[in-house]
Image (tube, helix red, strand yellow):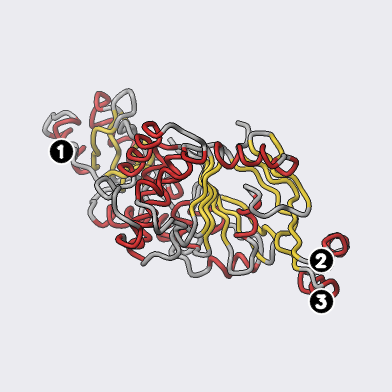
Amino acid sequence: MRPKVEVKNVTKVFGKSPKNAIKLLEEGYSKKEILEKTGSTIGVNGASFEIYPGEIFVVMGLSGSGKSTLIRMLNRLIDPTKGEILIDDTDIVKMSAQQLRDVRRNKISMVFQNFALFPHKTVLENTEHGLVLRNVPANERREKAMQSLAIVGLKGYENQYPSQLSGGMQQRVGLARALASDTDILLMDEAFSALDPLIRKDMQDELLELQETMKKTIIFITHDLDEALRIGDRIALMKDGSVIQIGSPEEIMMNPADKYVERFVEDVDLSKVLQASHVLKRAERMTPDRGPRVALQIMKAQGYSSIFIVDRKQKLLGALTADDASIAVKENKSVEEVMEKNLVTVLEDTLLTDVIEALSNSAFPVAVVDQENRLKGVIIRGAVIGALAGNKDDLNMKEVD
């Protein structure tokens, strides 16, 4: 798959001596030393990464890390001092003013922290704004804007003004405006940071739900690690203008690149990051037609007290304990007659916080299934406890069947 966005060795220097600053940077001087020698500030230092279609790519860091400067270079609201920024294999750094306007109108939308709404325009007019700039006919832009407002839950508010809306609703208008423009790329700069915690979580959930159908390429800026871990497919962690580490949430958590990243993630609740797939173990299974005697033989050989029962397509039917298998042998009953059918199951992407609850409600190890109820593996209490304690031996990074 070709990247949607490519950032190649991008550097931004603020100040009157960018060439001198770049030279010192290449010689190994620090951001602080360059500021003292030249009066120039290194905003971003040699950033390189690729973002793929349909990905939520989170750039996170503390204040002054360079994350907001970086996202503003992706649509050239800020021009880079050095490097290439490719959108669909075309370098926007080399584009003319007209070409850049076309990219901004047709390929990239942006959602800001402070909502960036026009106070004198209605919700509908704010939502239509990008389409007006593209000279979309009035009827068409109204239809698209109304559809976008409905998607974000603002149907019926189209004639209200921003001042009449709550912060969460104003942010929904900003998101609706971006959706109405129907661009492939969405830049979200601290989009939920101004919201109250509960509203913020709701907006994160809504974004993930919308992404299931939209499949936009989203670059999301945040200073909040919990937010990054919650919504990001991959995370780029920045410090002092440099990208320190790029990886999936679990990679960032379990394999921090250095002491800085390690300190950054040390207080995170792993149960809200790791998923069932990370503690998945192979599940012993058999089809019911093999009978209770075979079930007992398998359990004895493996040292198990129970076994899962599946059909020939690996769909989960139930579970059988050694005690119930013994009863079936004595009373000449089939596996189906004695097996437990009401099992607690979870999907592979279930967070461990929910897996823990499932384990507490089940007499059996928790079965992990896919959307078709095919058995993918099993979760035992010890593996969950070990993973939450940071024991990498209890983590499974490969699919288990």
- CA gap, disc 3 and disc 1: 82 Å
Mark 3 or 1 closer to N-term? 3
The relative height of residue 26 versus residue 89 in the rendered view (above or below) is: below
> Which residue is disc 3 drawn over?
36
**Residue 391 in the figure: left or right of residue 335:** right
Q: Quadrant of the N terminus?
A: top right
> Which residue is disc 1 drawn over?
327
Q: Position of residue 66 (x, y in %)?
A: 65, 62
Which of 180/232 is in front?
180
The relative height of residue 178 versus residue 356 in the rendered view (above or below) is: above
Q: Quadrant of residue 18?
A: bottom right
Q: Residues within 10 Å of mark 2 (few under 14, many from 20)?
A: few
Q: Residues within 10 Å of mark 1 (few under 14, many from 20)?
A: some
Q: Position of residue 354 (x, y in %)?
A: 32, 54
Tags 3 and 1 touching, CB below 8 Å: no
Residue type highlighted by circle 1: Ile
Residue 255 numbered tag: none
